[in-house]
Image: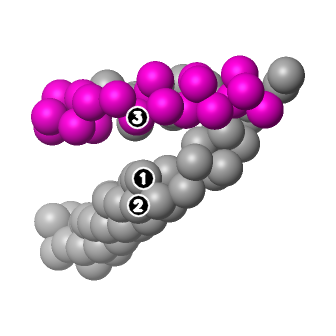
Amino acid sequence: MARTMEPLAKKIFKGVLVAELLGIFGAYFLFTKMHGSQDFRQTMSKKFPFILKVYYRSTEMSGIYGIRELDEKKWLESKN
């Protein structure tokens, strides 16, 4: 019985590993895209505000301050 489960366990392990790697690369891509484009952050604030909050928190925890304030200032100016 144990020998028949080994191939299934390997397939499940590989699937989980691939899913985790895709998640890591997706998060990295999203972070770099948000970090480089204020317009993309504005799009994210409209569609996925919770992701933008995580971005702001992570940059502030890493010692980069003022991004949130600059974004809010620009977005308020563009409304007027």
Mark 3: which amino acid? Ile
Residue on which disc 1 sits: 35
Q: Are marks 2 and 1 in contact (CB under 8 Å)?
A: yes
Q: Residue at x 55, y 32 (%)?
A: 71
If you read the primary sequence from the N terminus, does the residue marked by circle 1 or circle 3 appear first? 1
* Sequence-earlier tag: 2 or 3: 2
Res. 61 in view: yes
- Magenta part of the chain: 58-78
**Residue wearing tag 2:** 32
Disc 3: which residue = 67
Which secondary structure, mark 3?
helix
- Horizontal and vertical percent position of residue 68: 45, 27
> Which image quadrant is residue 60 in?
top left
Q: Position of residue 5 (x, y in %)?
A: 25, 67
At 46% from the left and 23% from the top, the residue drawn is 69
- Residue drawn at x 85%, y 22% is 80
Q: Residues within 10 Å of mark 2 (few under 14, many from 20)?
A: few
Indicate the amino acid at tag 2.
Thr
Distance from disc 2 to disc 1, alpha carbons, whole Å, reads: 5 Å
Residue 8 visible somewhere in the drawing: no
Q: Residues within 10 Å of mark 1 (few under 14, many from 20)?
A: some
- Compute the Cα span from label 1 to label 3: 9 Å
Using the image as rendered, state which of residue 8 and residue 53 is in the foreground: 53
